[in-house]
Each structure stands twice: as C-alpha cells, then as structure tokens.
Image (spheres, rainbow, N blue to C red):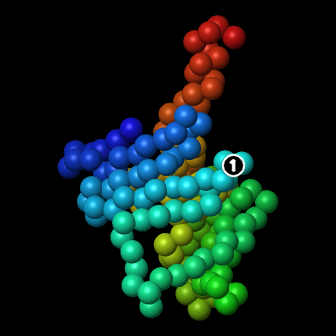
Amino acid sequence: MISASNSSGILGQYSYDGDGKRVKKYVPGTGETTIFVYDAGGKLIGEYSTIVAAPQDAKVAYLTSDHLGSPRINTDQNGAVIARHDYHPFGEEILTAQRTAGLNYSADSVRKQFTGYERDTETDLDFAQARMYANTYGRFTAVDPHLAFSHDRGT
C-alpha cells in the first residue's frame, strides 16, 4: 500500500497487485473506497465505489478517445455528448473562452484523462501505472522504475 500525504495529513491510500495495477483506492477526506476490476488481458473494466449515487443521479459515460488514448468526447447511454476535452501537449486541459459549456466543454466525474491516465482529484496527479504524472508541469513525479533498475545493475 502507498499513501499520498501533505502537511495536513493523508490524502489517499493506494493498493496495487503484482502487475502494478491499482486495485484499491481509499480517500480519508471523503471516506470513499474504490475497487478497480480488470479483465484477463489487464484492461480496466469496472470501478466500484462505496459512495453510490441515487438511481436518478447515476450516470453512464462512454469515452471516445483520440490516437493517444485521451478521452475527447464523453457520451451518455443515449449517445448525447455530456463532455468534451482538449489537452495541451503535456496533458494540461485546454481552457479558453471558445471552449464553453454550450459546446459541452465542462468538468465531469470521469477520471480518465490525458493518454488514459486516471486523475486523482485528491492529489491533482495522474496515475500513470508505474508512477504519478503532474500534468500542470508536464513531468512525472519520479524516475521511471525500469530505468532506475537498469542503472542500478550497470546496464
């Protein structure tokens, strides 16, 4: 288990399986626990949370991604556009006067963001499998573990 914290306490606790996939997330500030489920190929197929929306508020979102895996258009179960997203080259979302709520450029609750990384709102970092990514800086927060292992072995 890995914990993210700041001076005011623990922001989140994250658990991973042997393949490095996130399987559980706990956010003490909200009391929410989320379980992540993967198929046999390792693709995320479901998220289950302890904070459940009322039936009239529950939503389904289908993501249409670009060539990088970044969701660009989110639609509901009827095919109506509920959100659009555009990104700067290193992952920060583009917010301009031309991208208005009237064109469905608005915040949503979908965690998949730039290149399919999952945004953790409690830390404002993106979960990029082996490490975290700070989209506002266009940088990872740590060295790639594979490269660090290669350097440690002298290769």
Circle 1 SS class: loop
Query: Looking at the figure, which quarter contains the C terminus?
Result: top right
Eyeballing the image, is 18 above or below 89?
above
Which residue is painted at 51% across and 76% down in the image? 108
Which residue is painted at 57% across and 79% down in the image? 60
Query: Looking at the figure, which quarter contains the N terminus?
Result: top left
- Single out the residue that lies furthest toward the top: 154
Residue where numbered disc 1 is placed: 40
Q: Can residue 99 be spotted in the picture? A: no
Residue 152, position as x, y percentages in the image: 58, 12
User: In this rendering, would 131 be left or right of 6?
Assistant: right
Q: Can residue 144 be spotted in the picture? A: yes
Residue 151, position as x, y percentages in the image: 61, 14
User: In this rendering, would 89 be left or right of 5?
Assistant: right
Eyeballing the image, is 43 above or below 52?
above
Amino acid residing under circle 1: Ala
- Single out the residue that lies furthest toward the right: 67
